[in-house]
Image (cartoon, rainbow, N blue to C red):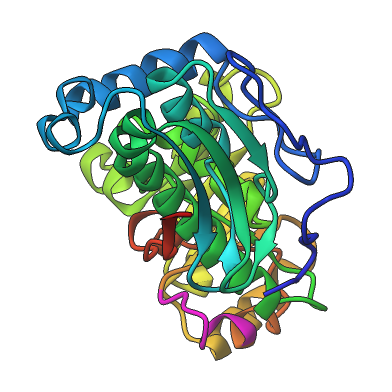
Amino acid sequence: MTGDHRRVPENAPRVVTPFSVPVVAGDGRHPFPLVPDAVTALVRAALEEDGAHADITTVATIPADRTARASLVARAAGVVCGVPLAVEAFRQLDAHATIRIDAPDGTAVQPGDVVLHLSGRARGLLSAERVALNYLMHLSGIATATAALVAAVRGTRAKVLDTRKTTPGWRALEKYAVRCGGGTNHRADLRAAVLIKDNHLTIAGAQLGAAVQKARALAPAGTRVEVECDTPAQVEAALTAGADIVMLDNMTVEQMRACVALVGGRAIVEASGRVRPETIRPIAETGVDWISSGAITHSAPALDLALDFD
């Protein structure tokens, strides 16, 4: 799984000294979404949740002065994401650990590739292991799932987008993982754009055109207005009302193709529903501009990574 991702970028940070946290993805285009203080607080809470500062198994079996070396390696092909969080986990339990980053965020890896080399207090490395891996495996899974969809639509005009179907409290990180996988973020939250769905129209008892006009009048200037459409008639009504984006919700490929022709470039066309690796290419070939997938954040399998001690 190479795609547009580079294997171990030449400008990748190689050594992490105490209290330095890398905050830019490996491709240099996607800044890490959390400032260092936020990374510190988030990881501290995760370590406390895991009881990492009172790891009775490690204290009982490992002498306090024992040092160790380890490599965090990929067991499966994928795209790495979450390295700054993993580094911070190890750093908090051993401020003097030496960490070499071989695969920064956004890097494609194959089985056996090394993500991190670590050297430091054995107790700290062992007690931080699970928290570090939890961050890396989950976020790398999202980046990997996104990269698979991006690769499947390559050569078409379609962009792969995420949704708001994210883990509460993790949205910034999970949307960052989508970017590391080559995807594009949809609206960040309910304030970012207007998206009129069937439930809005049903509860309000409003006509689609009137709903678009009211949203346009209320939203800040420049805010995009999108309408979820189930039928070509709704698409035409949304266009007539001046919608910027029409979402083709759970339509067949034939219906999507007809709606793309109906829109004729008058709005952005988004496809949503039933998006899987085996279905996304035919969807993209209908000519839609965007294809959104909730599965890349809410159902992405974790990437298999492991910490191996020398």
Residue 220: x and y in percent read 61, 17
Residue at image location 77% in from the left, 76% down from the top: 154
Bounds of the magenta span? Answer: 274-281
Towards the viewer: 148 or 270: 148
Residue 92: x and y in percent read 42, 18
Q: Residue furthest right?
A: 10
Instruction: Give residue 205's quadrant in the image.
Output: top left
Residue at image location 70% in from the left, 55% down from the top: 107
Q: Is residue 234 magenta?
A: no
Q: Residue furthest top?
A: 37
- The answer to whether residue 271 shows anywhere in this view is no
Instruction: Give residue 258's quadrant in the image.
Output: bottom right
Rendered position, 43 above or below 172:
above
Instruction: Give residue 171's quadrant in the image.
Output: top left
Residue 180: x and y in percent read 65, 49
Name the dominant secondary structure of the magenta segment.
loop
Residue at image location 34% in from the left, 55% down from the top: 298
Residue 118 is left or right of residue 229, and the answer is right
Rendered position, 118 above or below 301:
above
- The answer to whether residue 194 shows anywhere in this view is yes
Residue at image location 39% in from the left, 35% down from the top: 125
Q: Is residue 277 magenta?
A: yes
Residue 298 is left or right of residue 119, and the answer is left
Residue 26: x and y in percent read 74, 44
Residue 282 is left or right of residue 141, and the answer is right
Q: How many numbered badges does the structure rendering display?
A: 0
